[in-house]
Image: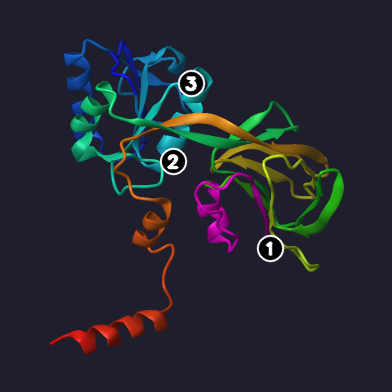
Amino acid sequence: MPAADFDRIGLVVHPRRELGDALATVRAWAERRHAELVQVASPGQGQQVAPRGDAAGCDLVIALGGDGTALAALHAAAPGETPVLGVACGSLGALTAVSADRLEAALDRVAAGEWSARVLPALRVAGGGPDRMAVNDLVLVRAGAGQVMLAVDLDGEPFIRFAGDGLICATPLGSTAYTLAVGGPMLAPGTAGLVLTPLAPHGGAVTPLVTTPESRLDVLLDPGHSGARLEIDGRVAAELAPLHEVRLELGWVEAYATLISLGEQESIVAGLRRRRILLDSPRMLARDDREAARTTP
């Protein structure tokens, strides 16, 4: 990327983590660059660390926290096509490019143009209110004791009808989050398309579904007697009233938001293994121990 001057820098901050050192670094760096520092409106921040401002007027948005903070920053920055620098104030995640202790050097690199754009796709959710975008996933889940009922059509044909706890529809990035946690398929990095995974289906033969970007998905949700929730990227986007069916159309958006990549972050698979979300079987680990014992002098 070309070198750039920054007139205005936006901040999105974690509501609870200790951010003192990272904030001091950003403030000092912005002051040296004569850049205005504003806090971008985004749900769940809690603390105010700078005057309020609009992400659309920023040259850069910095997310201080973790993957959840980076997700919030991506949604705030997407309409203005503003790049987001994810800063890990804790352990590195899938959406953070640098740890807080290396932030000053990272900002210097961004200003010098020594970064590349990591363009993220999204899931578009139409129906049940205004169109919504999900970087990770859409979750339709029961809100009370009763089950919900869902019918999924694929390209105009019935795919499956089932009752259960709900349904997850994830992007490839989101397939390594909630989808993976409930035993759904993980889509390899670089894959294009969506994956639908049922939550605790009651009977029937209900398999996850992996689609292409061109696939059309229609979901009819009956919230049952207890209602349901529509969650986008881990946040409640809508409360669905009991006994009121909602029809949703799900689609693929190839380029939604831009993350800054410094070329140093670990791959998604390496990060999952480091955090022991992907874990080798004990039998393989025991074999490794035996092999190590044989080769040790």
Residue indicated by mark 2: 68
In this rendering, does residue 80 appear at all?
Answer: yes
Which label belongs to residue 81?
3
The residue sitting at the right extreme is 157
The residues tagged by marks 3 and 2 sit, at their Cα atoms, a distance apart of: 19 Å
Q: Is residue 226 magenta?
A: no
Tell me the mark number nearer the camera, choosing from 3 and 1.
3
For the record, the magenta segment spans 174-200
Residue count near mark 2 (Cα–Cα under 10 Å), binned few <14, some 14–19, many ≥20:
many
Left or right for 142, reference 86: right
- 199 in relation to 64, above or below: below
Q: Is residue 201 left or right of residue 117?
A: right
Looking at the image, which residue is at 80% across and 38% down?
Answer: 247
Type of amino acid under label 3: Glu
Would residue 43 be seen by someone viewing this image from the given angle?
no
Q: Residue at x 51, y 53 (%)?
A: 176
Residue 50 in percent (x, y) is at 31, 19
The amino acid sitting under disc 2 is: Gly
Dot 1 corresponds to which residue? 200
**Count the marks: how many?**
3
User: CA–CA distance between discs 1 and 2?
Assistant: 25 Å
Few, some or many C-alpha atoms within 10 Å of disc 1 (few <14, some 14-19, many ≥20)? some
Mark 1–mark 2 contact, CB under 8 Å?
no
Task: Residue 32: give x, y in percent of width and height.
Answer: 16, 15
Question: Where in the figure is residue 219, as x and y percent of width and height?
Answer: 78, 44
The one nearer the camera, 70 or 243, is 70
Give whichever of discs 1 and 2 has the lower sequence position: 2
